Image (tube, rainbow, N blue to C red):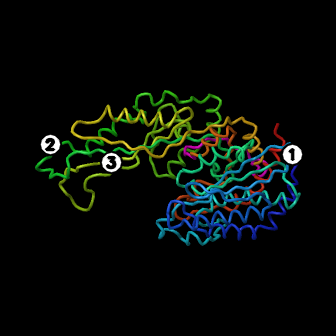
Amino acid sequence: MMNAQAVDQYFKDNRETHLEELKTFLRIPSVSSLSEHKADMRKGAEWLISAMESAGLENAKIDETDGHPVVYADWLHAAGKPTVLVYGHYDVQPVDPLHLWESAPFEPQVRDNKLYARGASDDKGQVFMHLKAVEALLQLNGELPVNVKFIIEGEEEIGSPSLPKYVEENQELLKSDIIVISDTGMQGPGRPAVCYGLRGLAGIQIDVKGPKGDLHSGLYGGAVQNPLHAIVEILQSFRDQEGLIQVEGFYDDVLEVSDKEREEFAALEFDLEHEKQEIGISEDFGEKGYSFVERTWIRPTLEVNGITGGFSGEGIKTVLPAEASTKITCRLVPNQDPDDIVAKLKAHVESHKPKGVTVEISEFDKGKPFLTPYDHPAIQAAGRSYEKVYGVPTAFTRMGGSIPIVAAFDEILGLPVVLMGFGLASENFHAPNEHFHLENFDKGLRVISDYLYQVAELD
């Protein structure tokens, strides 16, 4: 059993030092999507190596990929005990629009017990907590209750293009019993949650082309097909008025959720009225027979993300545009395959293509859905650790978003994935003024430390 009092005192004694170290990490503008920050990405990886070695981890190294580097380290001296693989990422989102930040995104500041900086919540702050939990236990005990491995990548914010290949080629190196990821959120302030399911993703772009150039709508309107009208007609065919997707075979492979699991969702007491007020809508929308939570966690979607074409500047221009395009993404649920869904989308577009235009479809952004049974011992152990520190029952949830690499881990390594995050939905990750509530930083350190002991007792 963990000496909770000693661990608590260690984190109290070292809190300011730890926060200063984290601020140093956050000052590195490791924006993976912008080539101008390539050197900063390398700097972020090198900072991690130093932090890992300082924490007491061994075999720390930077592994090259086709893109940004992967950082690895381990501690493997707990004979006969499970091995926990900790995954996270050191890359961050771009900071635009810069003028909306109240303080510089790469100059961390603490205000109202919140740490403001790009990456504070997503995901540098949460990665840092795992390093400090390991450090604390090694400093206090000279050993860990389990074996640990760390794999921290630099491309999560651009879809982890290099990581599946890396994992495939390094299966022996990454061989473990459990994967732990802190890159998700809690139910709300003081309401911890373990996420055990994520939706997948499939996206396409549809380009519709008509005449060889823009035409005068007075001379040609009514005699030539308008690509904007054509694209609207295609989009209208995708869903009915209640959001039910009309693509043939779209729901064929959907894994239905048990009544028991739906009862668990209902017990979370989701406040729909508060949610509507928070996001500024008068009424919710979606499939009949499913709650707001179920529509966003366990049902697949098809959403139009944007349409371009024609003239949209000030005033009016009587033009019949030569082309139009739209981007569509589908969130997928367990048993749905992104390649299969894209094929069905293409077939649907082809069968609903209006006359007088040509249509081209491009694929992008694919990720498989993920699910670990919520009664898995590793999931339940995480719930116990949260409850011990936060003093309230832990919610077991799914998440509507996608972390494509999670499904890749599940598929390649065949391990249970425990998503135990400490962020809050209000923390503006991916937006200006990203921040991390330091209450959850403090408690999260203790949760992670306890969890390593909980895992040590699993059969």
Q: Is residue 141 above or below residue 396?
A: below
Which residue appears at 62% of the width and 28% of the height?
A: 259
Q: Amino acid at mark 2?
A: Gly
Which residue is tagged 2? 222
Disc 1 secondary structure class: loop
The answer to which of 130 and 143 lies nearer the viewer is 143
Residue 121 sits in which quadrant?
bottom right
Looking at the rendering, the stretch of residues picked out in magenta corresponds to 386-403
Disc on res. 325: 3
Which residue is tagged 1? 79
| Residue 396 is covered by the magenta coloring | yes
Residue 40 appears at what percent x and percent y? 58, 67
Instruction: Specify few, some or many for label 3: CA neighbours under 10 Å numbering under 14, 14-19, or 20 or more.
Output: many
The answer to which of 274 and 320 lies nearer the viewer is 320
Instruction: Specify few, some or many for label 2: CA neighbours under 10 Å numbering under 14, 14-19, or 20 or more.
Output: few
Upstream in the sequence, badge 3 or badge 1?
1
Which residue appears at 71% of the width and 35% of the height?
A: 375
Residue 387 appears at what percent x and percent y? 76, 47
